[in-house]
Image (cartoon, rainbow, N blue to C red):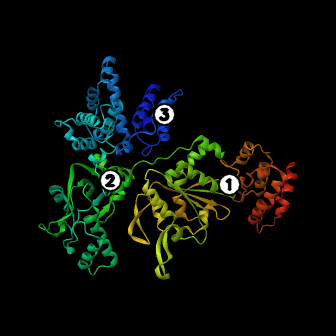
Amino acid sequence: MKLKRQISSASDEADVLAAELLYLNMLPLTGATIGLDRKLEIIKTVLSWTSYDVAIPADLVAAANPGYMKGGQAFLNFRWAQFAFLIRVTRELLDLPIEERERLLSDPWAFRDLARSVLPDHDGNFRARAQLHVLLFLLFPKVFVPVSAERNKWAIRDAFADRLPSTSGDVDWDIHAIRQALEREAGHPVDFYDEPWLSKWQPAQTRAQRGWLVRGANVNGTNVISRWLEDGFCSVSWREAGEIRAGASRKEIETAVDDAYPDHTNEARRAHVQQLWRFLSDMRPDDLVATLDGDTVYLGKITGDAYYDDSEGREIARRRPVDWNVKRTLSRKALPEEAQARLRDRRTVVDITRVTAQLAELADMGEEVAPAVVEADETRPLEIPEITPEAANRLLLPLDWLRETADLLMAKGQLILYGPPGTGKTYLATELAEMLAGPDRMDLVQFHPSYGYEDFIEGFRPRQAEGGTIGFELVPGPFKRAVEAAEGEPTKPFVLVIDEINRANLAKVFGELYFLLEYRNREITLQYSPQEKFKLPKNVFVIGTMNTVDRSVALVDAAMRRRFAFRALAPDRPPIEGLLRRWLTRHNLPEAPALLLDEVNRRLADPDRAVGPSYLMTSEAGDRRGLERIWATEILPLLEDQLYGKVVDVEQEYGLRMLLDALKLDLP
């Protein structure tokens, strides 16, 4: 953790102060942004750096839930700027005489002036401004409103300006006067996020805000971006199609494209229709738009409907007005990898909503971003819960091993648990998936020899059409369904468990996904959906289980082995070593089953064919009758199968009676 490195030499008091400031930063955020458990986990982590135990007071725990606001992009990706601002404010207060400090903390407007004075002069000013508004409300809720986005404050002031004799240049002062007037009218407190006031300043939108990439660096060999920036528009060509009205339906656009490009293939014409429809009809005023000129990224806001102006030629005739931000450009190479990946798309018009909030934040346009775009932002850090000591105790496995396994999965994206039968591979995989993603964001599929690409990713499946005829439809498999679900919650992990992963032809099942497993932020086309780009989000994880009796790890496809991390589960090595004894002790059962299992595996002398402890992790193993049933119906058949073709009398060598006599065990 970067913060730990920065304050590693600081005193215990400084660590506690850091925890207190982080608490203040996260206090107002609702569970939709960051849940109570995660808030407390972050604060407890910082408190753990002290040399003595520090507990979070119960009243502060209660106050942190549920919060009152969804954090904008700054609260999610730029906590460092918020935190630095709080440190500056605290330092200013501590440097003052106590009388002056108390005066400021009792005077809302004087305190606001102090807090404003420590906002940084550089880019961090914008990123810290939301924390300023939140801090003012927390300290003076009767004066300042619970609004963190400054643009929303101006919208409120403008919507209710008729309650003021005249507006001033101080938006906080105006809103304070407006709220007093409205509360006199209503006879009770006013919340600007409740009706009937909300719809006055934030009219309902028929469609959520989106973000777009429009390319203009090479329009029939000409770079037209300088014209866009100079005159405030963006454009697309398709000069052969002539004028098409703004907001045209797909059918209208299809007709125009068919007339303009009669010799093109159906696939090419469909691509033209999709691109034109996006520009003419899917884009809306208030959407954000980006364009690329070499390494430079420009960002702007669409301010009106599409229009047609061919006075300068058809190459730039099909236009949309844009308010370009030319003061704050971005370097493409410096962007997060997710944003770079989206900007690699070579199409003329591309939906980049999932990285727009990040681009806007970096370009000092964060206040132009609607909450829906922030929620869709895939550049936000993943919220990965830490595996708890309670979970490790429940599983009877070492906490360090579980956390290391989870870290491997998060770092690699794919993990395989392998080992002989009975080592709890499937059980552990599903438990680990639920600990990291929860039961609603995990799925399990089992591979088998007939399993293929069409089953796992997508394929055409027969369906009964009208009149009893049989048709085919493209149906997503469990992998594509997991990706679609994960895209809706980009900060939450989704885990797909693949049981018996080595029983299928992996090259056939995964197909082009081999590439995406290694290059998460690149896009490809799937063989059944060539018109769409497909990407494996960073929040989709795969846990496979592999039985080493069926096929050893060495025989798995080399390309697949390179893309997965592997964790062995063997009866004679941690974490499985001693698991049966721990389980028997917990359930107050005799040690005999553990001694029998050790003896069987000693005689087998083959780690890949060893017998795992789960066969005996049942209350039936506590007496002789139960052991006899387990031995006769599960363990001996397993050994006969594993030792098939070898000159071994399984009953004579591994029978329960023989082992009991050899170990001199007497069971009730």
265 w.r.t. 244: above or below? below
53 w.r.t. 620: above or below? above
Check disc 3 and report the residue beneath it: 61
The amino acid marked with disc number 2 is: Thr
Nearer to the camera, 449 or 569:
449
Q: Position of residue 74 (x, y in %)?
A: 35, 43
**Residue 313 appears left or right of 204:** left
The amino acid marked with disc number 3 is: Val
Question: In the rendered image, is residue 499 in sight?
Answer: yes
Give the alpha-carbon distance from disc 3 to disc 1, as whole Å. 41 Å
In primary-sequence order, the first of circles 3 and 2 is 3
Say the numbered circle drawn on residue 141. Answer: none
SS under mark 3? helix
Residue drawn where x is 28% and y is 43% of the image: 152
The part of the image, by quadrant, that contains residue 141 is: top left
Q: Are dots 3 and 2 in contact, CB under 8 Å?
A: no
